[in-house]
Amino acid sequence: TPESGVEMLGVLRSRDQDGKRIFLDLSLQYRLKPSQLGMLYSKLQLNYESVYISALRDALSKVGNKFAIARVWENYSEINDMMKAACKETLADMHAECWDLQLWRVRLEERYEDALVRTQVRKQAQKTEEARKMHSAVRAKTQVVLAEYRKNITVIESTGIAQKYQLERAAAATAEANIIQLEADVLKIIKDEVKVNKTNLTMNESQLVTYQKLMMLQSQKEANFVYSGLPVEPVNVQAARAMSGGRRLLDDVMEL
C-alpha cells in the first residue's frame, strides 16, 4: 500500500511494437519547480496533478508502442530509461521535474503470456526483484526529501511566529511610549496655560497631581466624587452636574 500522499492509479494499458496488448505497472516521482510555482498556479491552479496524470499516461502508453515486449525481459534498463525519459520530457514544459521512474511489472494477454513466460520467467523474476528493491530505495529517498521539507516548514513557521511576537511587542512598546510622551506634553501645556482664579499663577506640582487625579476620576463613567470646601457645602459633583444639565456649580472655586 502506498504511503500517504501517493496517488494510486490503475494499470497502464498499451500495445507493443507488434500490436500485442500489454499492461504496465510503474511508479514515478516528480517535484514542482519552486521558481515556476507562480506560472503553474496561474495556468492550472490546484488541478495540476490531474493534468500531469493525463499527460503522463498518454506519453508512457506511446512509449510502449516503440519496443517488442520481449525486450522488457532482455533489456529491462533500456525500457525503464525510455519510460523515464518520456516522463521527464512530458513534465519539463509543465513546471515540474520527473526525477525517477520504476517499471516494476509487465503483463500480456493470456494467449501471448504463456509462451513468453516459459522462456523469460527466470529472468523476469530476477529483474522484478531488482526493480522492487530499487523502488523501495527510491521511496526511502523520497521520505528523506519529504522529512527535510517538513523540517524547513517547521523552521520557517517558528521564525515567523517569533518575528510576529517581536513586531507586536515593539508596536506595543512604541504605542505606550507615545502615550506617555503625549500625556507629558498635555500636562506641560496645562501647567503653562491654566491660571488659578484669574491670576498669573500656574499650578504647582502638588496641584498638577491633584488635577491629574480629578481628570482620571472624570474619565471613569461609574466613578463619583464629593467636593467639600468653604463656602460650598459638600456635594456629589457628578450627580449634581447630571441634575443641572452640565451647568457650572462651583464658579467661585477655580476660574480657567
Image (cartoon, helix red, strand yellow):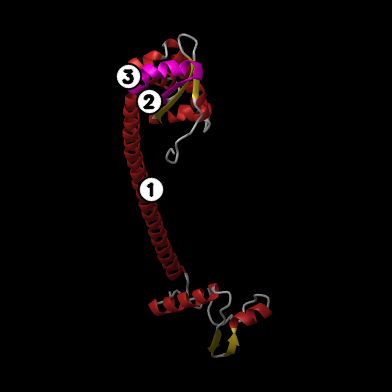
Q: Nearer the viewer, residue 219 or 173?
A: 173
Q: Which residue is outermost to the top?
A: 18
Residue 234 lies in what quarter of the image? Answer: bottom right
Where is residue 25? Give x, y as percent: 44, 26
Which residue is drawn at the image coordinates 38% and 48% (left, top)? 157
Q: CA distance from mark 2 to mark 1?
A: 33 Å
Give yes or no for contact between labels 2 and 3 (Cβ–Cβ under 8 Å).
no
Marks 1 and 3 sit apart, C-alpha to C-alpha, by 43 Å
- Place of residue 6 in the rendered image (x, y in percent of width and height, measured from the top left): 45, 36
Badge number at residue 92: none
> Residue 232 at x, y = what percent?
58, 89
Three-letter residue code for mark 2: Leu
- Give the side of residue 70 with respect to residue 112, left or right: left
- Counting other residues with Cα less than 10 Å from the Cα at mark 1, is it few (<14), some (14-19), or many (20 or more)? few
Mark 3 surroundings: few (<14), some (14-19) or many (≥20) residues within 10 A: some
Residue range in magenta is 96-124
Q: Position of residue 3 (x, y in %)?
A: 42, 40
Q: What residue is rendered at 40% in x and 64% in y?
A: 180
1 is higher (above) or lower (below) than 212: above
Q: Which residue bears the numbered disc 3?
A: 77
Which residue, given by chain and number where applicable, does mark 1 sit on?
Answer: 157
Front-most of residues 56 and 136? 136
The amino acid type found where label 1 is placed reads Glu
> Considering the image in quadrants, where does the N terminus appear?
top left
Position of 193 compared to 220: left or right?
left
Q: Decide which of tag 2 and tag 1 comes sooner along the chain.
A: 2
Q: Nearer the viewer, mark 2 or mark 3?
A: 3
Q: Quickly name the residue at label 2.
A: 101
